[in-house]
Image (cartoon, helix red, strand yellow):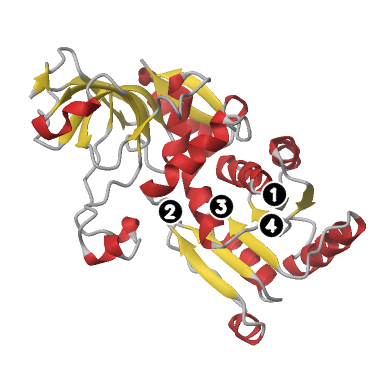
Amino acid sequence: MLGDLPAGSRRFTVENGRTVERAFDPRPPAAAEVLVKVAGSAVGAAPGAEIVGTVVASGAAAAEWMGRRVLVPRVLPCGECDRCRRGRASACPSRASRGAVATHETVPARYLLALEPPLAPTEELWRFAALADAAAAPYGAIVRAQVAPGDLCIVVGGGVRGRFAAAIARAKGAHAAILDGDPALRERALAAGARFALDAEALDAPAALASLHRQAQAAGVDSLEVKVIEATSTAAGRRRALLLVADGGTAALLADGDGSAPQADLDGIAESEAVVVGAAACHPDLLPELVALVVRGELPLAPETLALPFSGLAEAIAGVRAGRIRGLPILVP
């Protein structure tokens, strides 16, 4: 092993609504692993698995990573199984297990992304934890939906993932429309890059689609075939997305739902030859493209990220669930 195991490593969990801090000894890295000192741990869909930091120890086969700043993808597949070879990284049965929120984590080096030239961040390193999933998941969905320049891309949900989806769609040359019932979230989405915004509570999906077509045509946007990104992972959001796409086009449904099944117009989807795809965690191979958007200034992280201490884990989770925190909390040392 190269480097030394740190003293004073801490792990954080939530028990009875409070953050509990415990000391632990990080696992020494195996030959192809590294130990990362966490600079930012995002409290997103998978707290503890969305990190950025600096490599402080490595196995012999990963020595080139020593001292480098790295982004650790949420999903770390084996890269060798049949599912990995088919590009289904999230379905890899041998993907690395991830632990609780901690100051250090031992991970495989295979899919790390160096945040150094030519992908050198100009913003604070901790903010890049947002790319591990909160921005990466919608980016993967946009890729799976084949969103292209000039497309009308409807994003269902104005939360953090939805706003990142709107910003990424704009960066790819598409025209993003946000569908959400919260006026404050619609305003934030417009600031993030959405061109249109509609109230999901005031309009049902067919009426919203008709309204978007009218607005798009008035703005000179060809909206005959839409791309829909469902970013709420709720039954209600997925139902809206499937109704929107029943008129044709493509819908990508983000994972991490609550398990409830939406009612769907399957006849409409079949008759219009619509395409519906699932979109779980983004494949690590796509992350350099995402970081490049940040480096070029097309995907600003500062408006969507806020720093909290590791001891604020319980506060961050409660604040997000209650709607008091509208951005992405990132825990920092």
Q: Nearer the viewer, mark 4 or mark 2?
A: 4
Residue drawn at (64%, 41%) of the image: 167
Name the residue beneath numbered marker 3: 232
Looking at this view, is 238 or 34 the one in front?
A: 34
Which amino acid, by three-letter code, is at mark 4?
A: Ile
- Between discs 1 and 3, the one toward the N terminus: 1
Find out whether the residues at labels 4 and 2 contact each other: C-beta distance under 8 Å: no
- Between discs 4 and 3, the one toward the N terminus: 4
Q: Nearer the viewer, mark 4 or mark 3?
A: 4
Is residue 263 visible in this depiction of the protein?
no
Residue drawn at (46%, 24%) of the image: 120
Q: Position of residue 55 (x, y in %)?
A: 25, 23
* Mark 1–mark 3 distance (CA, rounded to whole Å): 23 Å
Residue 154's disc number: 4
Residue drawn at (33%, 31%) of the image: 16
Quadrant containing the C terminus in the rendered view: top left
Q: Nearer the viewer, mark 1 or mark 3?
A: 1
Residue drawn at (49%, 35%) of the image: 291
Q: Is residue 240 above or below residue 101?
A: below
Q: Secondary structure at mark 4?
A: strand
Q: Position of residue 329 (x, y in %)?
A: 49, 28
Q: Secondary structure at mark 3?
A: loop
- Between discs 3 and 2, the one toward the N terminus: 3
Rendered image quadrant of residue 247: bottom right
Quadrant containing the N terminus in the rendered view: top left
Q: Position of residue 313 (x, y in %)?
A: 39, 26
- Residue 287 falls left or right of residue 56: right
* Mark 4–mark 3 distance (CA, rounded to whole Å): 13 Å
Q: Secondary structure at mark 1?
A: loop
Name the residue beneath numbered marker 2: 256
